[in-house]
Image (tube, helix red, strand yellow):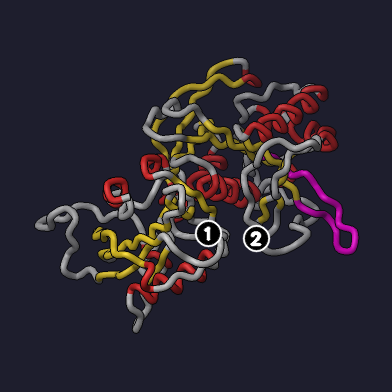
Amino acid sequence: MADEARPERPPFSFRARSSGAEIARPPSGRTSSETPAFKPLRTERLILRPFSPEDAPALHRLINDWEISRTLAEVPFPYPRSLADEWIGSTLRGLRDGAAWHLGITGHEGYEPAPKETLIGGVGLRLLPEGRGSLRQAGRAASIGYWVGRRFWGHGVATEAVGRLCRWAMANLPINRLEATADRDNLASIAVLKRIGFREVGAGVKTFRSRAGEVQVLHFEALRDDLFGAPDAGLPRGREQAAPPQPGIMPGTAPAHLPVLLVVAAALVNAQGEILLARRPEGRSMAGLWEFPGGKVEPGETPEQALIRELREELGVDASAGCLAPLAFASHAYEKFHLLMPLYACRRWQGVPRPREEQALAWVLPDQLDRYPMPAADIPLIPILRDLL
């Protein structure tokens, strides 16, 4: 990996042309155009978008640099001009197949009304075969890589771009772990990974094409909580990482000093016997996990009133208290509070459930619920739903 290894300053400032974050979605099938459909990811200053054939000359100028190539395992030096065209074509195929997301890091030079888009570097993410990540741990993983043109070192480009792609991936792709590898002498790249939330988990050797030999590397890993941090009880649904065991406290019970947080959820069941799940969007605690729709019970509300309100706010559907049947409840100790969550079954409502808070929705058969990663508090409800529904 290459990064801002020296404090050089470009003679201009780069910035995204428009402000405001956008929620990007993974590619949904193939497209007839040459560039796959993918909504660019934006940061405060940058835009991450698919490479296009027109990027080849700029890509070649930036990456055909020994200081860049020497830190990238799969990049040769010298870097042939024809290879830029071939590589861009391969990135578009990976994007269409939903197997890899290699994006150009761009900013804009100059000012309105005609700023010039500038290619700054690249960042890529590739799904690893299930159970075959470099650390060989359970669950699906993806590997992350990146580089920044030498002209743009020293401005935090890599931290901004890599962090954005990592958070998007964890919230939108079927993964629970990200992996990265860095030359152990590339201190700038290592610092980027640690700032984002990656943890060093091992060391080894890797063949670098540009150096025609093996290089000592460090392995890094990031889980969901490493990237998003532990939420607190004030956030919607209030679901966070389970508390570590404490002396004198039985598993599944809360220490006396933890407040009890009451939330409520619904298992909406359609005519086919499928249950509606909602995936927490990017920017929220536990982004990427699937849960039963619902939310926090506000002061003065009954659980039924809170659930009716949440279903209307989250999904745009109307349900009456008479259509909510108490089904089960979850009681789970988290780090900062104890969650108590009644779960209601609902088979009748008005309207078509639609995502109103940028969440993804999925109708799932009961015997397939365990295929969807869920918060710890929701998991014990799965066998109950299977038995009762």
Q: Position of residue 270 (x, y in %)?
A: 46, 54
Q: Earlier in the sequence, mark 1 or mark 2?
A: 2
The reply to whether residue 341 is visible in this rendering is no
| Crowd rating for badge 1 (residues with CA inside 10 Å; few <14, some 14–19, many 20+) | few
Name the residue located 51 percent from the left edge and 32 percent from the top edge: 181
Which residue does the image show at 45% across and 29% down from the upper left? Answer: 130
Q: Is residue 214 above or below residue 335?
A: above
- Horizontal placement of 365 versus 339: left or right? right
In the image, is 248 to the left or to the right of 345?
A: left
Question: Mostly what secondary structure, the magenta segment?
Answer: strand
Residue 204 showing in the rendered view:
yes
Give the distance between the C-alpha atoms of the residues marked 1 and 2, in whole angstroms: 10 Å
Q: Amino acid at mark 2?
A: Ala
The residue that mark 1 highlights is 283
Q: Where is residue 245 drawn, in percent x and y? A: 19, 52
Q: Three-letter amino acid code at disc 1?
A: Gly
For residue 210: magenta? Answer: no
